[in-house]
Structure formats: C-alpha cells, structure tokens
C-alpha cells in the first residue's frame, strides 16, 4: 500500500519536478520510502509503505531491465506467490519477493490482460522502454484510487486528487455534472467525474493504454452477471450459506498475506466480527483488534463496545478501544477534510480518520475491515422495497436513494451551476436498463456495488486509513466472493432483516447478540447533530467571503438550511446542511 504519481508527455520531456511535487503530497500514504524515475517522455514517482518484502529490493519505481518495464504500484496482490511460481516455471527470474515485481513479470508475460489473473486491490502504471507506451490499471472494485488530469501537453496521474493539484496546471473549475451527482447521492460522484472539471478518475476494473503520441484505448475487464447461473441450480439457503462462508474464508485467508502483523477494525457488527472469527479459525494468534467510540449524543449512543467486547472475549484477541470526545472530533475535523481526495459527507469518514490515527500509533500497519458487505449482501433499508418494484425498478430505487428532486436542486444551486437536465436520474435509468441483471434488486445491487460502494465507503476507508500510513484490506470485496453474491437469489440476501445468507453462515461462529442486533453505524454525534461549534463552523464557511465569491449556492436556500440545521434531512436521514457545508469546507481546505 503506497502512493504513486507520474506523467506521460506527448510533445516535450516529462516534468520530473512536477511529478516529485505530486509525490510529496503522498508522503503520509507511504512514510517508509520514496523514489523517482524518468526516461524521456515518462516520469514516475512513488511513496512506499513497507508491507511485503521489507528490503530495498522492493523499492519503487521498480525497474525490470530484462523486460524493459518500470512499475509504480499501490495496493496488494494477494496471490503474488502463486503467480510468481507460475512465472518462474515459464523462465522469469526474480530479484525480490515483492508483489510489485510480480506485476512487472506478469505484464511481460501476459500484457495488460495480466489484471485478470490478479486477486487483490491495485492501481498501477507500467512504462514500456521500447514502445514508449504507458499502461494504467485499477482493480475490479476500485479499492485503490487513480486520478487523471490533462496538464501542459501531458497526462498526469496520481493516487489522490490533491496530488494532481500540487503538480500545477489543472483546471479547478467545478463540474456541473459532478455537483448534480454529489447533491443527489449523498456525495457520491461516479467515475470518470470528480467535483473538479479538470480532474478525472479511472473507473474500476479498467485498463487504460496510452501511446507515445497521446492516442488511447480503454477496456473494462470485469463486469459480473447479477443473474442466476446454471451451476447454482438446486441450491437452497443452507447450501448458499455454506458456499458464501467457504468463499469468505478464502478471502480472509488471502488477506493475511504480509510480512507484518495483520489486525482487524472491529466495530462489533456482523461483518467485522465474522472476519475475526475466521482469522481465529485460521489459527492466527495474538490477533490485534481495534474499536472506537464517541460521546453519547441526543438519543444516539456513541459506541458499540458491548458487541465488540463479546467478540474480542470469545476469540481472546488483543483488543484495544478508544473513546473520542466531541472536542477531539472538532479538533481533527480540518485534517480529516484535508485527507479527503474528494468531499465526503459520511460521518464514518471522521470516525475512520480518528480510529486509523490510534491504530497506526499502536504500531499496526495492516488491518482487515468489513466494508462492502451491506452493498454486496443487501444489508441496507432501501433494498426491501425493490424486491417487488414494478418495471426495471429504477423509479423505486430513485424514490429510496436520490436526495433531491430537480426542483430542490434548482432551489439550491445557481442556474449556471446546473447541468441542464436531471443527469443523476438519467444515470440510474441507464444503469438499470443494462443487460446482465435479472431482477430490480439485482440491478440496484449492481449499481451500488459498481458505483456507490466505490465512491463512498471504499474511497472513505482508503483516504482515512492511508492518511496514517495504515493499509486496510476488505475481504467482502474479494472479487470471487462478489461474483458469488451477485448470483445469489435476492430473497436469500433480504432474509432475516437483510444479509440473510451471511447471517445464516455466521450462526456457528458468532454470538446471536451480534448476528441479530439492529443494524449499527459509526455514530459521530458531534457531527450528525449540527449544533454548537460544529454548526458555527459550517455557518462561518457558508457565509465567508470565499463562499460568496464562489457563487455556488442560492443565498436564500442556504439561509433556510442554517435556520433549521437539524430538520432538513434526505430520504435516508442525512443532513442536507452538512452536505452543503462539507463541500464548502473541503473547497476552502484545499485552496480552491
């Protein structure tokens, strides 16, 4: 897990100084080493977090002189040892035990199609010495980010959006389509858009090939069917739960691969608790687990320690928990916002930032985390209404999920900030109309897995953990587990109040209190209830000269939100004022 940056120039020599400035902003993602490389039109830089092969042989940029390739890579290839054995059998010679070198040899052997052999999370760039070609790739679920920008006759790329800004020359005007998405889907902006017109992101499961003359080819290499498959015929709930547990067991085992200890972020929910149980089953001893809690708020409990304690005691983990005060949350808020590559309104972002700070401070560098299970196994409240939705189901999905209708959007944003049509509603309709999903709930889960998951919880976990040099691994996003879940009948996922097939699988491993508890979240009362100092910070940002000069929001609508800071909520209960205020806070934090 690291940070990468680079550019391929088309009419000049690559600007290594700009690339090194970009890499410097990634220092917190990779505190254990740095490196840079250039060869005419291509320049690459890297910040390293040492997880696999702790020696300097694995330093990046990694140059493979035998094959004329140079690689920068962020992530982990969990099956790198198996691939190495296969490549060695084909005659490849290795000088390290790193997974980054496996990418180089695999690319030499199979070309860009090597991504289809990788089990892992990754974003990488491969520069070819002889052709001058550059290949960029991103993992199937978009766990590792990769941002792009056109600047001064070159294509630049980096692990974060602020890194591209540090390189200079980026168009920082706001993108009306992205703004519409942001305010429609509680801050989700699907690839390739970002909130800035001049920055794009490579979509998940995508390979982009860039020739020396600037011509490009882009290919999506993974798009699993959300349909019932013949090989699963005759399977009932018991058979499905066994299949899911077997595949999750493999996913957890894969994510044990490291040359440093691997811990678990234990919320006390079903998902992270299952990971602990399976790691214990694998025989991992002295397993470190970590939980965070907050001060209780009005009608909101600030921690779930009673559940995490049950699991920690059952499996005798080395458990640590921290309770964070409202004052600590407020003090950390500017730094947490600065760590966001894009504005994120979920309160979980602050919780993950603070938890990651404590876990990193305790000396842990790798953790497994339960993100993704709700999207993959239908754990959210908006899924049941889709089970019997008429037609394709997009109207029912929009009614549950979209935050603002066109009239409210027009009341919020000034006219020149609107894209001219309801692009967010059309995006949902187009996605639901695609082939490859059998039922309305299948279509919703496909959209959430491929789009919403990537640009909300996955991005949140990456940004907040990497701000403290902590690598987070997400077994519920193992691509083979996701493929299996996509084929699972929707009724089995909705059973038992949601995630039914997963709950059935957990019965032999976890206490019933954990399995059958009401669904919980990371509660952050100091932010979820905007009052006192948090409200004043939002007010100051929205009433500042910078906000007035930006001319983004209609003043009367902002005034109405500030007059009723708690009452204005989206359909899923999010604060509409926090959505507006967080965007302005993020723009100011990044000097935009």
Image (tube, rainbow, N blue to C red):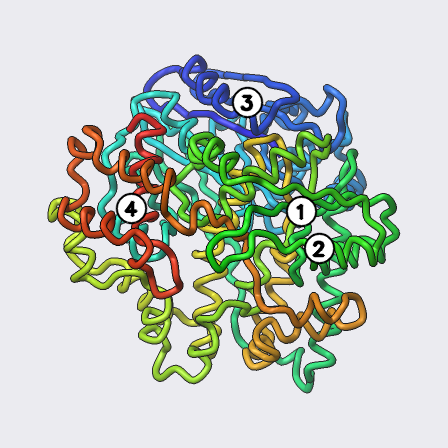
| Secondary structure beneath label 2 | helix
Mark closer to the observer (1, 3): 1
Question: Which sits earlier in the primary sequence, circle 4 or circle 1?
Answer: 1
Residue at the spot of label 3: 27
Q: Which mark is residue 108?
A: none
- Badge 4 is on which residue? 580
Front-most of residues 122 and 307: 307
Q: CA distance from mark 1 to mark 3?
A: 26 Å
Quarter-wise, where is residue 356 in the image?
top right
Q: Give whichever of discs 1 and 3 has the lower sequence position.
A: 3
Residue at point 31%, 53% (across, down)? 576
Q: Which badge, 3 or 4, is on the more N-terminal residue?
A: 3
Above/below status of 544 relative to 531: above
Residue 402 picture location, percent across and down: 32, 63
Q: Which mark is residue 291?
A: 1
Q: Are marks 3 and 4 in contact (CB under 8 Å)?
A: no
Classify 10 Å Cα crowding around label 3: few (below 14), some (14-19), many (20 and above).
many
Specify which label sits upstream in the sequence, 2 or 3.
3
Q: Nearer the viewer, residue 199 or 156?
A: 199
């Amino acid at each position: 897990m690291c940070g990468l940056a680079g550019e391929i120039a088309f009419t000049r020599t690559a600007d290594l100084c700009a690339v090194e400035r970009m890499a410097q902003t990634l220092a917190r993602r990779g505190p254990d080493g740095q490196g840079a490389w250039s060869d005419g039109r291509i320049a690459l830089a890297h910040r390293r977090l040492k997880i696999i092969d702790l020696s300097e042989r694995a330093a990046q940029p990694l140059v493979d002189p035998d094959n004329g390739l140079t690689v920068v890579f962020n992530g982990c290839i969990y099956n790198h040892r198996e691939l190495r054995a296969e490549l060695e059998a084909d005659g490849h010679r290795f000088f390290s035990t790193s997974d980054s070198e496996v990418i180089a040899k695999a690319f030499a052997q199979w070309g860009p199609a090597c991504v289809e052999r990788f089990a892992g999370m990754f974003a990488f760039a491969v520069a070819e010495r002889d052709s001058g070609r550059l290949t960029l790739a991103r993992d199937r679920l978009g766990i590792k980010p990769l941002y792009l920008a056109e600047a001064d006759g070159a294509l630049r790329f980096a692990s974060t959006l602020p890194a591209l800004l540090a390189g200079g020359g980026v168009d920082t005007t706001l993108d009306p389509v992205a703004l519409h998405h942001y305010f429609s889907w509680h801050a989700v902006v699907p690839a390739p858009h970002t909130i800035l017109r001049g920055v794009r992101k490579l979509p998940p499961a995508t390979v982009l090939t860039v020739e020396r003359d600037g011509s490009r080819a882009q290919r999506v290499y993974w798009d699993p069917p959300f349909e019932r498959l013949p090989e699963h015929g005759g399977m009932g709930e018991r058979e499905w739960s066994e299949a899911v547990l077997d595949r999750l067991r493999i996913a957890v085992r894969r994510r044990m691969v490291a040359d440093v200890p691997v811990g678990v972020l234990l919320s006390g929910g079903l998902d992270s608790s299952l990971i602990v149980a399976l790691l214990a089953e694998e025989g991992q001893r002295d397993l470190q687990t970590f939980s965070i809690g907050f001060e209780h708020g009005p009608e909101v409990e600030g921690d779930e320690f009673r559940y995490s304690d049950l699991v920690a005691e059952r499996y005798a983990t080395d458990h640590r928990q921290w309770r964070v005060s409202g004052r600590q949350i407020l003090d950390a808020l500017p730094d947490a916002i600065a760590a966001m590559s894009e504005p994120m309104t979920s309160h979980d972002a602050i919780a993950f930032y603070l938890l990651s700070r404590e876990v990193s401070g305790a000396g842990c560098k790798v953790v497994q985390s339960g993100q993704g299970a709700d999207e993959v196994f239908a754990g959210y409240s908006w899924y049941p209404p889709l089970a019997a939705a008429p037609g394709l189901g997009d109207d029912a999905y929009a009614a549950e999920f979209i935050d603002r209708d066109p009239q409210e959007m027009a009341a919020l944003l000034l006219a020149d900030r609107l894209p001219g049509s309801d692009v967010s509603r059309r995006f949902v309709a187009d996605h639901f109309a695609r082939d490859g999903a059998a039922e309305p709930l299948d279509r919703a889960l496909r959209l959430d897995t491929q789009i919403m998951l990537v640009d909300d919880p996955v991005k949140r976990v990456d940004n907040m953990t990497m701000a403290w040099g902590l690598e987070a691994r997400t077994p519920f996003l193992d691509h083979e587990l996701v493929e299996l879940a996509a084929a699972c009948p929707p009724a089995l996922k909705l059973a038992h109040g949601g995630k039914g097939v997963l709950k059935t699988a957990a019965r032999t491993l976890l206490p019933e209190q954990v399995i059958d508890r009401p669904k919980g979240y990371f509660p952050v009362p100091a932010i979820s209830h905007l009052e006192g100092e948090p409200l004043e910070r939002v007010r100051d940002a929205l009433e500042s000269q910078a906000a007035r000069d930006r001319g983004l929001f209609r003043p009367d609508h902002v005034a109405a939100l500030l007059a009723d800071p708690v009452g204005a909520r989206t359909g899923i209960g999010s604060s509409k004022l926090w959505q507006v205020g967080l965007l302005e806070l993020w723009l100011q934090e990044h000097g935009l």
